[in-house]
Amino acid sequence: MNRVLIVATTTGYQIRSFGEAARGLGVRLLFASDRCDQLADPWWDQAVPIRFHDEAGAVEAVARACGDTPPDAVLAVGDRPTVLAAHLNAHFGLRGNPPAAAAASRNKRAARIAFRASGLPTRIFTN
């Protein structure tokens, strides 16, 4: 059975559609969420509690939780978890956006500079 790690700001009601789709495909979902690590599983989803601002600590916590069975894919749900998901993909040797590209995608100025450096047309802006 394939295992997909979903990194999300919360794993409450908005993630249910992922669960339904996963069941239909025979995929097991794992969750990592930026939540209080002192609460005893408030959403009953067994998510790994992480902090998006502590990327190294979050990668370590997820890797420890996965043990010898890394996920087959890592998905970010929402804008905030994109950089961490990129770091997790790199850690597990999975395909995905490089962390620097994920970070640039969250910053319009950085994205425009990267687009311009790659020869892509961009709106006029000041460096």
Image (cartoon, rainbow, N blue to C red):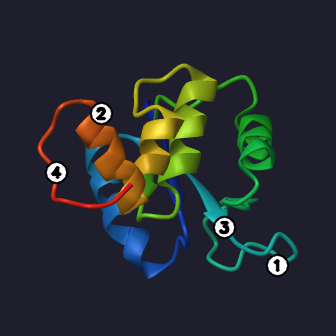
Q: Nearer the viewer, residue 116 or 34?
A: 116
User: What crowding class fits label 3: few (fewer than 14 Cα within 10 Å), some (14-19), or many (20 or more)?
Assistant: many
Q: In the rendered structure, which amino acid carries the disc numbered 3?
A: Asp
Instruction: Please tell me the numbered disc located at residue 77.
Output: none
Q: Disc 4 versus disc 3: distance between alpha carbons?
A: 34 Å
What residue does disc 1 label? 39
Q: Residue 38, located in which quarter of the rendered image?
A: bottom right
Q: Which residue lies furthest to the right in this view?
A: 38
How far apart are the two marked residues, 4 and 2, measured between alpha carbons? 10 Å
For residue 63, side relative to residue 85 (left or right): right
Q: Point out the frontmost of discs 1 and 4.
A: 4
Q: How many marks?
A: 4
**Camera-nearest label, 3 or 2:** 2
User: How far apart, in angstroms, are the residues tagged by discs 1 and 3?
Assistant: 12 Å
Image quadrant where one finds the N terminus: top left
Look at mark 4 in the image and give the residue it sits on: 122
Answer few, some or many: residues within 10 Å of disc 4's Cα (few below 14, many 20 plus, some between 14 and 19).
Answer: few
Q: Which of marks 1 and 3 is nearer the N terminus?
A: 3
Few, some or many C-alpha atoms within 10 Å of disc 1 (few <14, some 14-19, many ≥20)? few
Callout 3: SS: strand
Contact? badges 4 and 2 (CB < 8 Å) = no
- Counting residues from the N terminus, which is met first, the one under dot 1 or under dot 4? 1
Mark 2–mark 1 Cα distance, whole angstroms, equals 45 Å
Residue annotated with mark 2:
117
Task: Return the x and y of residue 50 as percentages of the image width and height.
Answer: 73, 59
Residue depicted at 73% across the width and 62% down the height = 51
Secondary structure at numbered mark 1: loop
Circle 3 is placed at which residue position? Answer: 34
The residue type indicated by label 2 comes to Ala
Which residue: 82% across, 78% down? Answer: 39
Q: What element carries label 4?
A: loop
